[in-house]
Amino acid sequence: MTDQLTISTLTLRHRIPADWAADPWAEVRPLVDGVDVLREVHPEGLAPSRRHWTGPAESWPLAVTREPRRIMITEPTCTAGCCGALYATVRREGDRVIWDAWENTSDATALPADITFDAGQYEAELARAAADRDWEEPVDTLARLLGQTLAGSGWFERWGCVLTGVWPRREEPDVPEELTSPEGVDVEFRHVQAPGERARSYVYELLIAGDQPIGEQVQQLAARILADDPRKTAELRGR
């Protein structure tokens, strides 16, 4: 008798890690049949950041393309190049999505078994997670909306600059208030200088007002940035 193929269900859960110093966005953590099987084999690993789920569907971390591809499932709080990561090959066979050929370059204690998903359920869950905003805290919403406003303005390009990121800045747990930055948003950009010259990096460290609607704050902060040459009003890093 042939064993019946087990078809698993994928659920993606947004989670803001306790140690988010490497990346302040939430991780998008995969659960298989409701179980965080990756935590069992790589307890210290973090799933790919929510910031990687903003582009076209084929660029999402868990997207399935025509050809099998090696993807990173979890990484440490530093970088994969530093302490390794947990990888799998993701491929599609007909109406199935398969995770197999697991590879451990980290301190994972074991490797998961091959996992098979229904392709329709799998791709629907990826789309749902990419559109999900319920996990956001006010600082995340502010960072996302401000980033969209600034990216669409063309303002930084006008001054020979490139917007490199808009990040939520969270209060660090268990750190005295005088030693940590208050909650807010960091807007980072760099000035592209002449060929052969080192680019200069700048940052706006913006505060979030807990008693003011997020939409109003986005408008006010964007107006402040778009009022003048950003190289004059932002802080220069690496002086």
Image: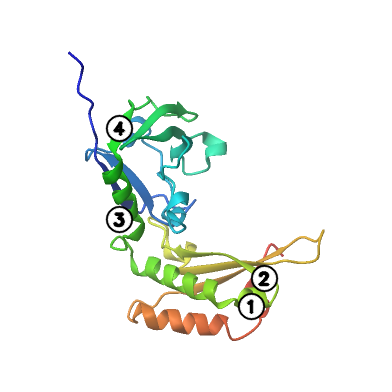
Structural distance between the alpha carbons of marks 1 and 2: 9 Å
Mark nearer the N terminus (1 vs 2): 2
| Identity of the residue drawn at 53% across and 74% down | 152
Q: Is residue 17 visible?
A: no
Q: Which residue is mark 1?
A: 230
Q: Which residue is mark 4?
A: 116
Where's residue 196, x and y in %? 82, 58
Q: Secondary structure at mark 2?
A: strand
| Identity of the residue drawn at 54% across and 84% down | 224
Q: Are marks 1 and 2 in contact (CB under 8 Å)?
A: yes
Q: Amino acid at mark 1?
A: Pro
> Closer to the camera, 74 or 149?
149
| Identity of the residue drawn at 47% across and 63% down | 180
Task: Tell me, for residue 161, which label it has, or none.
Answer: 2
Q: Are marks 3 and 4 in contact (CB under 8 Å)?
A: no
| Identity of the residue drawn at 41% across and 62% down | 171
Is 168 placed left or right of 11 in the picture?
right
> Closer to the camera, 11 or 200?
11
Mark nearer the N terminus (3 vs 2): 3
Structural distance between the alpha carbons of marks 4 and 2: 45 Å
Q: Nearer the viewer, mark 4 or mark 2?
A: 4
Structural distance between the alpha carbons of marks 3 and 1: 36 Å
Q: Amino acid at mark 4?
A: Thr
Q: Amino acid at mark 2?
A: Cys
Neighbour tally class for label 1: few under 14, some 14-19, many 20 plus, Cα within 10 Å? many
Neighbour tally class for label 2: few under 14, some 14-19, many 20 plus, Cα within 10 Å? many
In the rendered image of this protein, does residue 92 appear above or below residue 63? above
Q: Secondary structure at mark 1?
A: helix
Structural distance between the alpha carbons of marks 1 and 4: 50 Å
Mark nearer the N terminus (4 vs 2): 4
